[in-house]
Amino acid sequence: MRNYISYSTRNIQELNQFSKIGTKRLKEIEVVSSVLPFKTNNYVADNLIDWDNIPDDPIYTLTFPRKEMLSNNHFAQLESLVQKGVTKEAISSMVNKIRTELNPHPAKQKHNIPTIDGIRLTGVQHKYRETTLFFPSQGQTCHAYCTFCFRWPQFVGFDEIKFAMKETDLLVKYLKIHPEVTDVLFTGGDPMIMKTKILETYILPLLSSELPNIQTIRIGTKALSYWPYRFLTDSDADELLILFEKIIQSGKNLAIMAHFNHPMELSTTQVVDAIRRIRSTGAQIRTQSPILKYINDSPQVWAELWRKQVNHNCIPYYMFVARDTGAQDFFSVPLVEAWNIFRMAYQSVSGVCRTVRGPSMSSTPGKIQVLGVSEIKNEKVLTMRFLQGRNPDWVARPFFAKYDDRAIWLDELKPAFDQEKFFFEEELENIFNEHISDAENDIYE
Ligand SMILES: *Cc1c(COP(=O)(O)O)cnc(C)c1O
Ligand code: SF4
């Protein structure tokens, strides 16, 4: 099958496997998807989901909303409105209220938006010195939606500041006056949703000889998992691969940052062929995923995921901790457990898989890796370090938090050894205070 068909609540009854879902679950999907966006497609449904194993099947869980993804309270409130048959407006005001309570802007993303000549580059985030994130305005959707995704404010039309920008001009201007930037990371949504012609308009200007500082172009995507035909049989798939070749020929590194959550996504001939085609252009494929309860919370699954990736010439890169937003209560794995899963998986694979780093939290001060549980002078602690920091000097300095096997995020951890603050906290506060006065408060949320 090559023609892309997407499914949402609007046309779910046309899904081949519709009868397997059942009326009770269908109702739940309807209620939950009013808050968390729902979209799947024919490739995912026909190739990745074992329909005899729903709702436990990992890829079903990955793309189909279910009751437990909202709190009991939120679900009951919404369900009763739906049952009463109240107006659309009444439902949407409840939906907005719930979304606000789900922390749609974790890790103070709004702080990372740069300005140039007084214009805010709303499609750009620049948090770590070497790497600029770029959110092309036409890449803000995906071939299917992950139920855990923290990007959901961008898809549901709720966000006023859509991290999106119409033109590359400003980005190029910005990169010219920021020679410290070596990497541009295209992200979304999924940039691979864009037609090659549009993607070209964004990428080709970055290959200009006026930007010698740009050495790596990265594209974050889940298309290998959700729609491998993007690289195989879509009408402009060949042009896409030619674009990749152009990037390589310009002397820059092209890294496809592929998002794989479960080994099942690497098991079809389509994905294997797509990987092969991408690799034949000279591009690298690096892989990343959050650790998610019900989807991949076991060492065996991770070990298999990394081994499969390496067998297909992909480079394992990051294991993330699920962010504190959206359906996080459902998916969250405590930090200590995440480390145990990481450790056991890491111990069971050979060195070629150990390019992966994690578990890592993308938090306000930076990407923080949980190195593990240690005992120092009779005190049990969590040893951590920055993989990326708002201040690059924070990176690779081990620091310690009080042991807490229930904590799922940085803000629940306390410094060890009766210290009042973590070593970076005061500086972080100063960074934010400067920001506020710079922008006259308008970017402070
Ligand atoms: C993860 C991330 C990057 C990329 O970091 P690398 O460690 O170079 O992969 C850049 N910007 C932000 C905001 C990020 O979260
Ligand atoms: S593909 Fe990426 S951006 Fe899209 S829903 Fe999944 S995690 Fe979010």
Image (spheres, grey):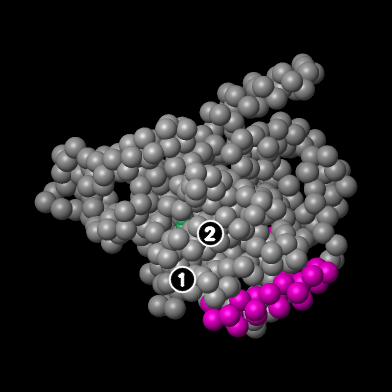
Closer to us: mark 1 or mark 2?
Answer: 2
**Element carrying mark 2:** helix
- Residue closer to the observer: 342 or 253: 253
In the image, is residue 242 part of the stretch drawn in magenta?
Answer: yes
CA gap, disc 1 and disc 2:
13 Å
The image quarter in which residue 441 lies? top left
* Residue 302 coordinates in the image, percent (x, y): 50, 63
What segment carries the magenta color? Answer: 226-252
* Residue placed under numbered mark 2 in the picture: 173
Dot 1 or dot 2, earlier in sequence: 2
The quarter in which the N terminus is drawn is bottom right
Side of 408 where 331 appears, left or right: right
Label ID, residue 326: none
Judged from this view, the residue extending furthest toward the right is 14
Which residue lies at the image location 85% right of the left edge and 62% below the top edge?
Answer: 3
10 Å neighbourhood of mark 1: few (<14), some, or many (≥20)? some
Depicted 72 relative to depicted 38: above or below: above
The quadrant in which residue 433 appears is: top left
The 10 Å Cα crowd at callout 2, few under 14, some 14 to 19, many 20 or more, is few
Q: Which residue is mark 1?
A: 213
Residue 307 vs residue 324, the one in the foreground: 324
Whether ligand 1 has any atom under 8 Å from the Cβ at mark 1 is answered as: no
Of the residues shown, which amino acid type is indicated by label 2?
Answer: Lys
